[in-house]
Image (spheres, helix red, strand yellow):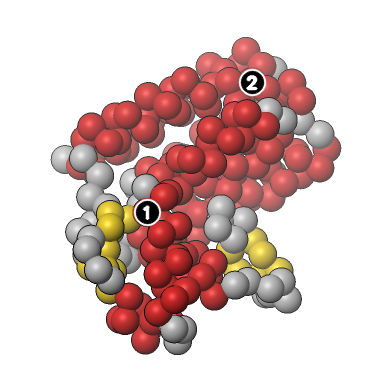
Amino acid sequence: MSTSSARGAPVPATAFEPESARVARVVREEIVDGTREPGSRLVERDLAAELGVSRIPVRDALRVLVAEGLVTPRPRSWAVVREFTPDDVAHLQEVRDATEPLLFALAAARRSADQLAALDECWRREDEAARRGDGADARRAAADFHERVLDAAGNPVLAEVHAVIASRVRWLLGRHTDLVAMAEEHRDLLDAVRGGDEERATRLARAHLRTSRAAASATRG
């Protein structure tokens, strides 16, 4: 049995997870999955009672989620789930347009056998979840797939840049509704990375970003 880390990757059930990290993880997943809707209140005492912790780890968790761009602070002891505007989404997409084709090209050039195995595992989880209609699991696996591409790219500066927007990217990937089509695009990207085809990986990544942009627009509409 396992849980998910702050970035969404599985964490062994035996691993120690501080209370503040657990609260941040749970609330993050609820925001990304849409369980906590944009604009909904996050009150320290209510979250503490709900999750069985004191208010201190809740306060620390909310600070983390504010820094990740998923939560908007309010005075005193509460916050709200961020409401992403069309401009917010457009700016995030611009950053992805600039970085993700490069990430996939670098992954195709540098991937190791272990990294390919990790990518394949994420894609299989995504594909299986998509085909059984489990949207939450499919979207989490899809986000994990993108983060394993980041690992395979082997560029620590890009990793630092991505760390700033990682949670918002997970939220954006959660706007996809055609989960099987997204899994199929990831399969093609995985094939390009596995084959070391940097040009094809770049081309497919750009097409994938167009799909993501259309999905975000359809969701807003």
Q: Name the quarter where the C terminus is drawn.
A: top left
- Comparing 124 with 59, the one in front is 59
**Amino acid type of the residue tagged 1 in the rendering:** Val
Instruction: Examine the rendered structure and indicate whether residue 137 appears above or below residue 194.
Output: below
Question: Looking at the picture, how far across and down is residue 160, in whole percent?
Answer: 58, 35
Residue 162 left/right relative to 45:
right
Furthest-top residue in this view = 199
Q: Residue at x 40, y 69 (%)?
A: 59
* Residue 58 visible in the displayed image: yes
Q: Residue at x 37, y 24 (%)?
A: 94
Quarter of the image for residue 5 reads bottom right
Question: Looking at the picture, how far across and down is residue 81, in whole percent?
Answer: 28, 58
Q: CA distance from mark 2 to mark 1?
A: 32 Å
Question: Looking at the picture, how far across and down is residue 124, in whole percent?
Answer: 63, 50
Instruction: Examine the rendered structure and indicate whether residue 126 appears above or below residue 119.
Output: below
**Residue occupied by mark 1:** 66
**Residue occupied by mark 2:** 105
Regarding mark 1 in the picture, which secondary structure is present there? Answer: helix
Instruction: Examine the rendered structure and indicate whether residue 18 appears above or below residue 111.
Output: below
Regarding mark 2 in the picture, which secondary structure is present there? Answer: helix
